[in-house]
Amino acid sequence: MKHASQLRYAAPLSILLLAGGAHAADPDPQYGANPELPDPQRGLLPNMGVPEQAPWDDKLPTVPDGYRIDAIATDLEVPRQTLVLPNGDILVAEGKGGGNAPKSRPKDFIAGLIQSKGTTSVKGGDRLTLLRDSDGDGAYEEQTVFAEGLNAPYGLALVGNDLYVANQDALVRFDYQEGQTEASGEPELVTPLPAEINHHWTKSLTASQDGQHLYVGIGSNSNITERGMEAEVDRAEIWEIDPETGAHRAYATGVRNPTDLTIQPETGRLWAVANERDELGPHLVPDYLTSIQDGGFYGWPYSYWGQHVDPRVKPENPEKVASAIAPDYSLGSHRAPLGVAFSNDAVGGEFTDGAFVGEHGSWNRADPVGYKVVFVPFQNGEPAGDPVDFVSGFLTDDGRTRGRPVGVTVAPDGSVIIADDLTNAVWRVTRDDAGQPANDEDGAVMSEDDSTMADEESDTASDDPAAGEDTSTSP
């Protein structure tokens, strides 16, 4: 597909990516290791705005030249994260948690109303769905419920024959045998997870390379401790858990909302994406991608981006501020990254060395940002250059949104799997030369009365035409 946007600024490695047909993310002085941090802006209400929902019609997300995108599952029930199993099957965690956090301020009610405009009307499935491509044609014609009756499942990890699921209130384990299409029994409890209030309910999950430890990301119970520090016990932390005993310790603290975790294949290091605090203006505080140090403190609530003190937190804690670690890489403010996965050589092109990040999109700034999957290039194991758009086109030219990316998974064959919890679909990006068949001419696989489009306006065609040729499957 061709892209109309022009690059105005790019770091050197990003220029190389663009030469290969990639599309630079919108320029932002906050990208990278040393973001510009303006003075905080505070008011009665923060800047708020969520794009209204729009249908895809015959449109598709935009991918770089040489790649195609297909909807491999539709009509799901709030897909969040995915896991590619050893035989190529894909597990999808479906659920919608939280909802128990009391609204103590007028702005909480207003923010809730605005945020609801950008969410699906579909009830969370509280289940795992398994997708299978039986004949290798890329169509994933089999779709079965692997497990149900869960509690807002989010993070997924497989270690040997143990399938771990991070519900919003507990880490559980299923027995798994390759080729299974449904669980053989009820899950076993590994350990309870903090669930009171659950202002940030998602529980991200990954396993160490040797399988000896599991890591669970647990978000804070507030924006900036407005419920008191007693509500933040065991919150804004990444736990290291012994899968055999359930024993855990705080591996890292001060990470406001670690929404996804992954292991860097070459180094075995733990990395995370995190959503930072709100209500300091449209350009504070940058969300980030970072390696996670054992015992590291990342600032919340006392400071952000290292030693930048948040004046709202009383009493202050200069000792903690002095110890705060600045994240490795700023993604820009209010992008809401919810997924991260390292690439591999099979992805091909200019996207073999780096990390893909699913940006769910902002609600707390007037001009929307995020709503796409970006690629952060790496060199020598570290981020090196501005992010590059990998999957975009979720936002329309008239300021509406067709979808919202969440989890991102890179399969061994180089396909990139993306959960979309507004479209209620799973997308798959592959190279044009990856052996995928051409589309059926009639194409569309999503029902015309798609329940994610709750607004009457969603029946109106979008003004944002898909650019260039596409050889992909439309939802």
Image (cartoon, rainbow, N blue to C red):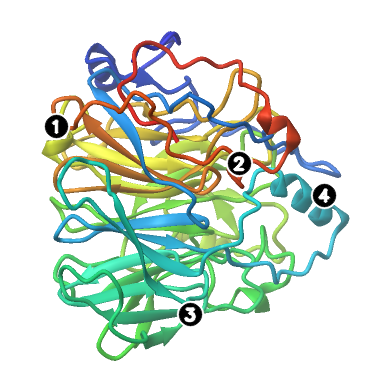
Which amino acid type is shown beneath numbered disc 3? Leu
Q: Nearer the viewer, residue 28 or 421?
A: 421
Q: Earlier in the sequence, mark 1 or mark 2?
A: 1
Q: Nearer the viewer, residue 395 or 279?
A: 395
Q: What label sits on residue 110 in the rendered view?
A: 4
Give residue 193's position: percent from left, percent from top.
48, 80
Q: CA distance from mark 1 to mark 3?
A: 41 Å
Mark 2 surroundings: few (<14), some (14-19) or many (≥20) residues within 10 A:
few
Give residue 54's position: percent from left, percent from top.
62, 31
Mark 4 surroundings: few (<14), some (14-19) or many (≥20) residues within 10 A:
few
In front of the other: label 1 or label 2? 2
Give residue 68's position: percent from left, percent from top.
28, 27
Work out whether residue 212 can be spotted: no
Which amino acid type is shown beneath numbered disc 2? Asp
Mark 3 surroundings: few (<14), some (14-19) or many (≥20) residues within 10 A:
some
Q: Quadrant of the N terminus?
A: top left
Identify which residue is drawn at 30% across, 19% down: 22
Which amino acid type is shown beneath numbered disc 4? Ile
What kind of element bears circle 4?
A: helix
Q: CA distance from mark 4 to mark 1?
A: 47 Å
Q: What label sits on residue 382 in the rendered view?
A: none
Work out whether residue 319 can be spotted: yes
What kind of element bears circle 1?
A: loop
What kind of element bears circle 2?
A: loop
Q: Earlier in the sequence, mark 3 or mark 4?
A: 4
Give the residue pinned by disc 3: 193
